[in-house]
Image (spheres, rainbow, N blue to C red):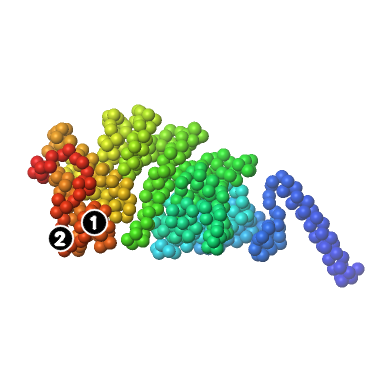
Amino acid sequence: MNSRFKKIILLLLAAAMLAGSGRLQKSLNHERAQLGLTRADVLENAPPVLAFTTVALGGFRGLISNYLWMRANDLEQDDKFFEAAQLADWITDLEPHFTQVWLFQGWNMAYNISVKFKDFSDRWRWVERGIELLRDYGLRYNPDDLLIYRELAWFFEHKMGQNLDDANVYYKQEWAKEMMPLFGASGTNFENLLHPQTAEERTNALVLVEKYKIDPVFAQKVDAQWGPLDWRLPEAHAIYWGARGLDAAKKNPDKVKQDDVITVRRNIYQSMLQAFQHGRLVMNRFDQSYELYPNLDLIPKVNDSYEQMMREDEKFRSNIATGHQSFLKNAVYFLYENDRIADAEKWFRYLGEKYPDKTLIMGRPDSYPTNVTLDEFAVATVQEDIGETSQDRVTSVVEGLLLRSYYQLTIGQDDRAAGFKLLAGKVYQNYEKQINKGMSNEKRIGLPPFADINRIVLNQLLDPQQGVPFEMRAVLRTQLGLPAETNAPSISTNAIPPAVLPETNAPATNSIGK
């Protein structure tokens, strides 16, 4: 038998073996799919390079990706994040259903690579790239993977929502700029997204779905269950992706771990707490910047969330109760601060009923009396860090509260203005009352009359050279009923309307020398 004939025989034999292995591979793929052992199906709508690698390499994809994964971990340990990111990208091409590589690469971009840059805009590009990777690609190939939903919720809650990254304010601003055209100035513009009437509204609805992968119908359900939320802020999106993950877990209960479900629920509850603390965006009309304020309308639902957590998570019930108590204290104080006294009274009573064995005064030892009034509670919250015996520090606090009151007045936050003004008066009264009671052997120094402190603060704000900008001075004068600005360097005490001054029982003749 000559060599040419042998080659022909071998080629025919190889072709027969390839044909047989192909038929066998189809059978194995079918059995794997039935048993849920692997997902070797051809990907739909995949990029050409991804479709080629998943089909051409077959079972060898796992061996190659394992090697690349080990190499990526080594590079990560050596702080070679960019090289590790490239390898991770190759692994996602080879094993698009390998959850851990999506989590690794998204985290690497949003946390490790981003902080290598000093410029906040560069950091933001990497944070957003990490979000896009999980949202646009990870979920594309793993639409029911709870861990990817969990990671997305965490990025919004922790990386963007909290303040551990010194660029967090920049992240919030950039995200608000992107969301503003979609959700409007109030952050809850669902009507135009669900029922667009104009070309612009139809474009916005399409961008929301196609670019940001947000289903407006599901988002509205999330807002109804957990809100009202401001969808220009990251907390709303953390809750959205957490809720999407829980929805996917319900559809595939056998494929998820209960611990992962609990973690996602915590993402939602923690994001709810953050949304309560700073979940309302208010524009400063003077410099066109945005500031974060508490979302007090969320208090009942945040409270319900804590109650539900304590029912569902028996292992950490005691820790959750501690957090619940802290939340209630903050809720009472924030309501008081915003001049919502009736609501503050309601939750103050609830706090006392729910935790009767704990002090109601924040930062005080448990032996402190609990039968305090709402006013005493609010003042104690402010005075926690100032010390009752420090005349200078108490004066500074009163001045600071008045400054905040007038500032809130200029930007249209009348309730907060009234709340800060009330609080300033209560802190003043409390200090004077402690002096009159003589509760300490330490020599105490009286405060200047409240009217004098108020006049000094207002003079500072309205001073043409050293005060706030002209536009703010004009608004403040209008709000207080003062005459238009003149060349006078200060304002007479008699020119200040009585409504500006909180009621106080302190004698009008108090002096520093008392």
**Mark with earlier residue (1, 2):** 1
Say if 478 sits above or below 323 in the image: below
- Spot occupied by residue 337 in the image (x, y as percentages of width and height): 31, 44
The label shown at residue 149 is none
Label 1: few (<14), some or many (≥20) within 10 Å?
Answer: some
Left/right of residue 242 with respect to residue 44 in the rendered view: left
Q: Is residue 82 visible?
A: yes
Q: Which of 364 and 334 is in front in this view?
A: 334
Residue visible at 26% across and 53% down? Answer: 479
- Spot occupied by residue 213 in the image (x, y as percentages of width and height): 56, 56
Observer-side mark, 1 or 2, equals: 1
The label shown at residue 489 is 2
Whether the residues at callouts 1 and 2 have beta carbons within 8 Å, the answer is: no
Q: Which of 295 and 98 is in front in this view?
A: 295
Residue visible at 42% across and 34% down? Answer: 321
Residue 330 figure quarter: top left
Quadrant containing the N terminus in the rendered view:
bottom right
Residue 360 figure quarter: top left
- Spot occupied by residue 401 in the image (x, y as percentages of width and height): 25, 48
| Residue on which the image places disc 1 | 477
Q: How far apart are marks 1 and 2 (CA)?
A: 14 Å
Left/right of residue 29 with respect to residue 288 in the rendered view: right
Work out which residue is located at the far left of the displayed protein and give it.
513
Label 2: few (<14), some or many (≥20) within 10 Å?
Answer: few
Work out which residue is located at the far right of the displayed protein and give it.
1
Which amino acid, mark 2? Pro
Which amino acid, mark 1? Arg
Residue visible at 63% across and 55% down? Answer: 141
Quadrant containing the C terminus in the rendered view:
top left
Say if 352 sits above or below 475 in the image: above
